[in-house]
Image (cartoon, helix red, strand yellow):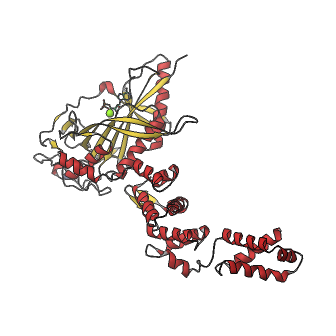
Amino acid sequence: MHPGWEPVIGLEVHAQLLTRSKLFCACPTTFGAPPNTHVCPTCLGLPGALPVLNAEAARMAVKAALALDCTVRPKSRFARKNYFYPDLPKGYQVSQFDEPFSDHGHLDIALEGAEGEPPRTKRARILRIHMEEDAGKNVHTAGSVSVVDLNRAGVPLVEIVGEPDLSSPQEAAEYLRTLRDILVFLGINDGNLEEGSFRCDANVSIKPIGEARLGTRVELKNINSFKFVEKAIASEIERQKEILEGGGRVVQETRGWDETTTSTFPLRSKETAQDYRYFPEPDLPPVVLDDLFVARVRAELPELPRVKRDRFVTELGLSPYAANVLTQHPRIAAFFEEAATLHLDAAHAGRVANFIQSEVLRDVTTQGQQASIPVTARQISELIRLVDTGKISGKQAKELYVKLREAGPEASAASLVSQLGMAQVTDPKAIEDVCAKVIADNPKQAEQLRAGKEALFGFFVGQVMKATKGSANPQLVNDTLKRLLAAG
Ligand code: ADP
Ligand code: MG
Ligand code: ZN
């Protein structure tokens, strides 16, 4: 019986930087343009065209490095990675090789604890981050004709290479989610796996538990969803176990994920891997990121998701769960925080959080950096203020929210309430409390009424109206009194 296996996983992430123009030329990066319209002599690799580094791309790349606690090298270099492929017009990709602009950082990921244990944090080391240009896109049409769209050629990417520190498919998925959230909060990436603006290659090996030496790894290429990453890694671990337990050896190779067979399949063997003949890019000077530049970028760093989550818990009194839900996207977090803090009152923030989670979020859609939220933070704050002050009930708040959504961002919650005649109505629970008290305070009349003296019903209604200074909904008072008196 084998003592057991320990998976070892290291992820390489390619994230597209949200610059307006490409890495080395002024061509736009906008998605969805007609094929080969966003090209120029530089990104087509025409003779004599010279690249110039996009400073905005460097600024975004440094943001990623700082957020992941990497060291930023004051001087780094681009290199040519040579290979032939139709989507690569120059015959080489401009990347960074032995002198990346940053290295040695880490990413803390939150993991569920073992049974009965609290959640724990795991630190996964980052080996390096470098800048590189994207390739174009081969489009395989019906009739076995392939065409090439070079709009994407030269779009800026950062490649974030993780150390092999992850030990399960779940840890790998959590690493990716955490990394994606950070890049989206930094405003430098769309975080979209399906559309390929955030791409992941997973390196997977297994070794006997306790063994120091790493096993032979397999690289799983371009898996385009978090769910698939987890499934692909799990299936690959099983495949390697079977091989090793059957006395075989794992072949170092690149494999793909087939969702229909839910298994990995070979793409190419590493043994026949080409030599990229990296050499320093002669057309670009070294990248110089001086202290002042790095300090400026550091000063621009926004609050990162984990810090925000902790602050929502400690400052605004949210549960960790609510804080997690409300920091899933920077726009949602900003919307919540604005609504929660327009009135400085601890209970207000909690009510705003609950209301956004239960009512608003189901109407919110996010797309990359954008989120469409159907009401404004001011409207939600005002609406919850009406609940805070007892003007409307929780149930009415939901109705009012629907009306606000229809009325548009200019509408005021308070004026809608008076327009709709909501303000005079109080919470059914509050009415019930008053009714119960009036009945308890007048036991003799209650007894007489139950014995058949129905005229006394008006007396009870009058008492409730008096107690609520006429603000209670008469119908609600009638119904509630009838119910309570009948219940005896
Ligand atoms: P390449 O560029 O050929 O993919 P690298 O040496 O840059 O090779 O390694 C890339 C990734 O492979 C890193 O993310 C690293 O963590 C991971 N890795 C390296 N060795 C192993 C291993 N034995 N098992 C799992 N992952 C590994
Ligand atoms: Mg690799
Ligand atoms: Zn161009």
Q: Nearer the viewer, residue 456 or 283?
A: 456
Q: Image point 70% across, 75% down: which residue?
A: 476
Image quarter where the N terminus lies is top right
Q: Report x, y in % for residue 3.
A: 52, 18
- The picture quadrant where one finds residue 422 is bottom right
Residue furthest toward the right?
Answer: 451
Q: Image point 19% across, 49% down: which residue?
A: 293
| Image-based side of 468 in relation to 260, left or right | right
Query: Is 67 drawn above or below residue 446 in the view shown?
Result: above
- The picture quadrant where one finds residue 484 is bottom right
Q: Report x, y in % for residue 456.
A: 82, 81
Image quarter where the C terminus lies is bottom right
Q: Image point 26% across, 52% down: which residue?
A: 299
Q: Is residue 287 in view?
A: yes
Q: Nearer the viewer, residue 149 or 475?
A: 475
Q: Quadrant of ligand 2?
A: top left
| Image-based side of 452 in relation to 263, left or right | right
Q: Nearer the viewer, residue 441 or 322?
A: 441
Query: Is 19 drawn above or below residue 166 in the view shown?
Result: below
Q: Report x, y in % for residue 132.
A: 24, 42
Residue furthest toward the left?
Answer: 48
Q: Report x, y in % for residue 160.
A: 31, 40
Q: Nearer the viewer, residue 460 or 106?
A: 460
Query: Is 389 drawn above or below residue 164 in the view shown?
Result: below
- The picture quadrant where one finds residue 126 is top left
